[in-house]
């Protein structure tokens, strides 16, 4: 009887600790949950000549692909990583933006790369809101 009790206790401990170490969705502990990344489109404005002007649209895709369609119609593509704890995007070298910070009101602020030339970004950053075509941008 003592052996059976010991086996039962060991089984319960293994099941409890095993469940605690596994994500609730059953995935691997190294998987990045898609729900943590604010995917989709954001319309951005910047400054030019002291005025606020439309600068372009970010598109964040599953898997780390990002695009930025600027005001002049040029599409810049690159890759991102997202740190959910810091709510920050970091972009691969060569992209027109260095990093972006995401906020809980579904907005973000992005710093333009020093060597990038984007329209309406005199101050070196853009402020973005969740895109609503025809409302927040084209």
Image (cartoon, grey):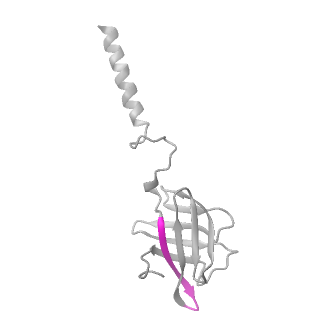
Residue at (42% x, 40% y) in the render: 26
Residue at (55% x, 91% y) in the render: 50
Instruction: Locate residue 74, reporting x and y percent.
Output: 63, 78
Residue at (67% x, 79% y) in the render: 117
Give the side of residue 3 with respect to residue 127, left or right.
left
Residue at (39% x, 34% y) in the render: 19
Q: Is residue 57 magenta?
A: no
Give the side of residue 47 with respect to residue 136, left or right.
right
Instruction: Locate residue 31, reporting x and y percent.
Output: 50, 46
Looking at the image, is 41 positioned above or below residue 46? above
Could you say which quadrant of the image residue 105 lies in? bottom left
Looking at the image, is 135 positioned above or below residue 9? below
Looking at the image, is 28 positioned above or below residue 8? below
Along the viewing direction, whichever of 28 and 106 lies nearer the viewer: 28
Q: How many marks?
A: 0
Looking at the image, is 69 positioned above or below residue 53? above
User: Extreme left residue here?
Assistant: 1
**Quadrant in which the N terminus is drawn:** top left
Instruction: Locate residue 2, reporting x and y percent.
Output: 31, 9
Magenta residue span:
40-50
Could you say which quadrant of the image residue 126 lies in? bottom right
Q: Is residue 46 magenta?
A: yes
| Dominant secondary structure, magenta | strand
């Amino acid at each position: 009887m003592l052996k059976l009790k010991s086996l039962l206790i060991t089984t319960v401990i293994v099941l409890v600790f095993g469940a605690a170490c596994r994500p609730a969705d059953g995935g691997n502990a190294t998987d990045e949950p898609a729900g943590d990344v604010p995917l989709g489109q954001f319309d951005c404005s910047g400054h030019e000549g002291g005025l606020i002007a439309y600068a372009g649209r970010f598109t964040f895709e599953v898997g780390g692909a990002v695009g930025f369609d600027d005001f002049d119609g040029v599409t810049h593509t690159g890759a991102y990583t997202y740190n959910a704890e810091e709510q920050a995007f970091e972009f691969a070298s060569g992209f027109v933006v260095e990093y972006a910070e995401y906020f809980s009101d579904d907005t973000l602020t992005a710093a333009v790369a020093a060597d990038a030339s984007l329209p309406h970004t005199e101050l070196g950053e853009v402020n973005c809101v969740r895109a609503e075509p025809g409302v927040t941008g084209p």
